[in-house]
Image (cartoon, rainbow, N blue to C red):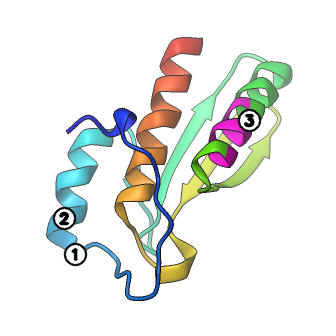
Amino acid sequence: MELTKKHCVPCEGEAKPLTNKEIEKYLSAVSAWQLNKQCHLVRTFTFSEFLLAMDFVNKIAKLAEQEGHHPDFHIHYNIVELEIWTHSVNGLTENDFILAAKIDKLFNSAS
């Protein structure tokens, strides 16, 4: 499953969150991400300094805007915590995993 080659699509009307079985399948493609208590995707990134963390956040912001799908950011000096879920369905959709995979690719290319 090559999620980085896909694009987020708007969730319309009858869109439903993924089932637990579907979530497990997608999680294997973004193994650095975890589920929190709310069943949102979460991941923490650590950098050597504040400006590197902010550069990464700005790259994610540009990507998120292109995809039309936006994560929640929590920034603590050199630590960036991301939380992703689809607000309109109050759960996870393929879009969340596409964005997570693309964020991983950004991080790996910056490392």
Q: Do residues under tags 3 and 2 come within 8 Å of each other at their CB atoms?
A: no
Q: Do residues under tags 2 and 1 come within 8 Å of each other at their CB atoms?
A: yes
Q: Which mark is residue 37?
A: none
* Residue shown at 38% from the left, 51% from the top: 97
* Residue shown at 21% from the left, 44% from the top: 28
Quadrant the N terminus occupies: top left
Mark found first going from the N terminus, 3 or 2: 2
Left/right placement of residue 70 relative to residue 27 reads right
Span highlighted in magenta in the image: 59-65
Crowding at label 3, few (<14), some or many (≥20) Cα neighbours within 10 Å? some
The secondary structure that most of the magenta stretch takes on is helix
Q: Which residue has dot 1 on it? A: 19
Q: Is residue 68 visible?
A: yes
Q: Nearer the viewer, residue 52 or 106?
A: 106
Mark found first going from the N terminus, 1 or 3: 1
In the rendered image of this protein, does residue 71 appear above or below residue 52?
A: below
* Residue shown at 47% from the left, 35% from the top: 102
Q: Is residue 78 visible?
A: no
Q: Quadrant of residue 23?
A: bottom left
Q: Nearer the viewer, residue 71 or 10?
A: 10
Left/right placement of residue 19 relative to residue 46 reads left
- The amino acid type found where label 3 is placed reads Val
- The amino acid type found where label 1 is placed reads Thr
Crowding at label 1, few (<14), some or many (≥20) Cα neighbours within 10 Å? few
Q: Nearer the viewer, residue 68 or 46?
A: 68
Q: Do residues under tags 1 and 3 come within 8 Å of each other at their CB atoms?
A: no
Q: State the CA–CA distance, disc 1 to disc 3.
A: 30 Å
Quadrant the C terminus occupies: top right
Q: Which residue has dot 2 on it? A: 22
Q: Which residue has dot 3 on it? A: 57
Q: State the CA–CA distance, disc 3 to disc 2.
A: 28 Å
- The amino acid type found where label 2 is placed reads Glu
